[in-house]
Amino acid sequence: MAETQFMPPVTQPHSRLHGCWFPAVAANNFHGWKQIGVKGKPASKSYGDLQALRIVWSTAPTPKKLSTPVEVQRSPGDSPLERLPTEIKNQIIDHLVLDIPPEGLSSRNADLMAMLLTSRTLHSATLNALYRNITIPHSRIFRKFLAHLTQNPELGTIVRRLDFSHFNPTSLFTTASERATTRNLTHETLLRCLELTPYLREFLAQEYVDEDIDVHVLRKLFFGLERLQGLDFCACSSAPFKAAFEAILSDNWPQTLPITRLSLHRCINLPSAVFETLLPRLPYLTHLDVAGTRITDAALMSIPHTARITHLNLAKCKLLSSGVVIDFLTNHPAVKNLVYLSLAADFRSYELLDEDDVTRLIPILPSTLRSLSLKGSTMNASHINLLRPLTKHLEELSMGRRLKAEDINRLFLPDEDMEQLDWVPHTLKYLDLSDYIASSLNLPALFGSASLLNRHSAPLEVVELPDDAYTRLSRSPVVTRAGWTATDFGSRAWLVRKPEGTRDHGFRDWKMGAAFWGMRKVPVAFSNVGGMYGSYMFKRHL
């Protein structure tokens, strides 16, 4: 409403009696005499409308006319998404890729297939994501993939990974004779596939495809792919696979191989000569998993000094001696920056480290270590003082046997005679106590005021248990009241702490895509873990 002021008459400018106030004062809700209605009809016949005369009320604002949006005409390939830099487009499209294929025969990568049909620009960008890392869950997918490469050989130059870790032959065929009849995946078709993928960097196999890896496939992998860096033969132990490896030992091997990550995990029947021939030719080695194999002391010491090993799995290697292993870890320049180390053994059949060996080993372990397995070794209470400095940077620790629950608690609490200000909290997330039977763990004491399952043990999240302890604790309400949950997966069982806030999901760079704690197989490729590799990492006994 405008500010009112007195307007004197023109003929008597000094009069306060005559004149008028402008604008005239009226109620805020007064809209003019003509607009007052009585029973639906105008009550005034006056032709004066004060609002129209602009005496009291300001003019009502004229409503703005909504402008019709102008449709921008874009030429093909000129949308905001298509005009993004290639690196950003690739990052966006990579989120549509499924590392772990769906169960059964259901279609996968449907989003990527839709992107292929969107435009030419997105078609070329999507091809890179679709063909860079190939996962083969069954032989029909392999047959289609090989047919595409045969018709379009240029697609083979995109392929960087060939992953058979999810391969399951029973998803299509119930008998071996049916699989043999179709001949979708054979050593001939596998060799043809490798010849069409000249820039392959990672080849991931497992026990379900080992009979299709013959001597020609092995020669192609070791001698015919100059850019191959990751090679995984997890649990390949068939007689044809062993014979193929023995056959190439007499070949003329090059002085060096480009492989940096090698897994022969549970290749239990490969002869020692394979390791003595292969390991000296790996000057760039960073990941080595020979768990459960026949590697010898000589083969281990033959690893070139130029190697920079961060992940080393020597679990259940019965031909290794403790003295050579400790000497290797102490003096060999290739293992000065270890992140993952497993020296686990099954004490029921074999022991690598006795009490004296453990005493010699622990002080020489590097500060870069994040995961250490001494499972199967013989330990005593004096080793706790040696382990304490390691617990300030370790996240996974698998304990040896013959310790008491009171000894293990000392990893998480300072001694009574220790200055509290000198105590540095631990960083452990996972503790493996599966070497202990339930009676030796003293289960009631686990939930006491000074136990490793109390709040003072945080950030400890997972405690692996023996089978008999899990059977008892899984039915106990004490576990829930203490803030833990008993769970199992395959042959392994754990107590998992209930999170008070946001749970640490366990993803670490050194795990290369794995999330769970207690990894028992070294990965050789950065990807989500599943299939047979997930089984050997987290589901099976040692």
Image (cartoon, rainbow, N blue to C red):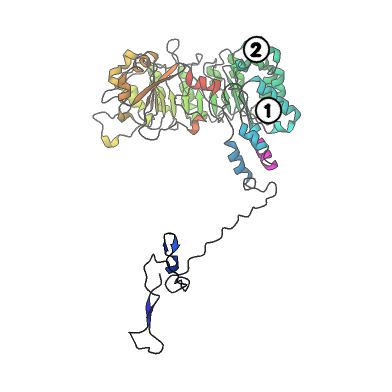
Question: Type of residue at label 2?
Answer: Pro
As drawn, 35 above or below 274: below
How many C-alpha atoms fall within 10 Å of the one at disc 2: few (<14), some, or many (≥20)? some
As drawn, 63 above or below 537: below
Nearer to the camera, 423 or 445? 445
- Residue 488 figure quarter: top left
Q: Which residue is mark 1?
A: 225
Q: Disc 2 on helix, strand or loop?
A: helix
- Magenta highlight on residue 127: yes
- Residue 218 figure quarter: top right
Say if mark 1 contacts mark 2, CB within 8 Å. Answer: no
- Count how many numbered circles sit on residues in the image: 2
Hey, which residue is sitting farthest bottom in the picture? 11
Can residue 66 be seen here? The reply is: yes
Q: Position of residue 70 (x, y in %)?
A: 63, 55
Q: Position of residue 173 (x, y in %)?
A: 63, 14
Q: Disc 1 on helix, strand or loop?
A: loop
Image quarter (top left, top right, bottom left or bottom right) of the N terminus = bottom left
Q: Position of residue 328 (x, y in %)?
A: 49, 24
Question: Type of residue at label 1?
Answer: Leu
Image: magenta residue range: 118-128
Nearer to the camera, 394 or 539? 539
Residue at (44%, 18%) from the top-left corner?
492
Return the mark for residue 240: 2
Nearer to the camera, 415 or 191? 191
As drawn, 27 above or below 483: below
> How far apart are labels 1 and 2 at the CA level?
22 Å
- Magenta highlight on residue 376: no
Q: Which of the two discs, 1 and 2, labels the residue nearer the N terminus?
A: 1
Q: Position of residue 341 (x, y in %)?
A: 47, 25
What's the magenta bit mostly, secondary-structure-wise? Answer: helix
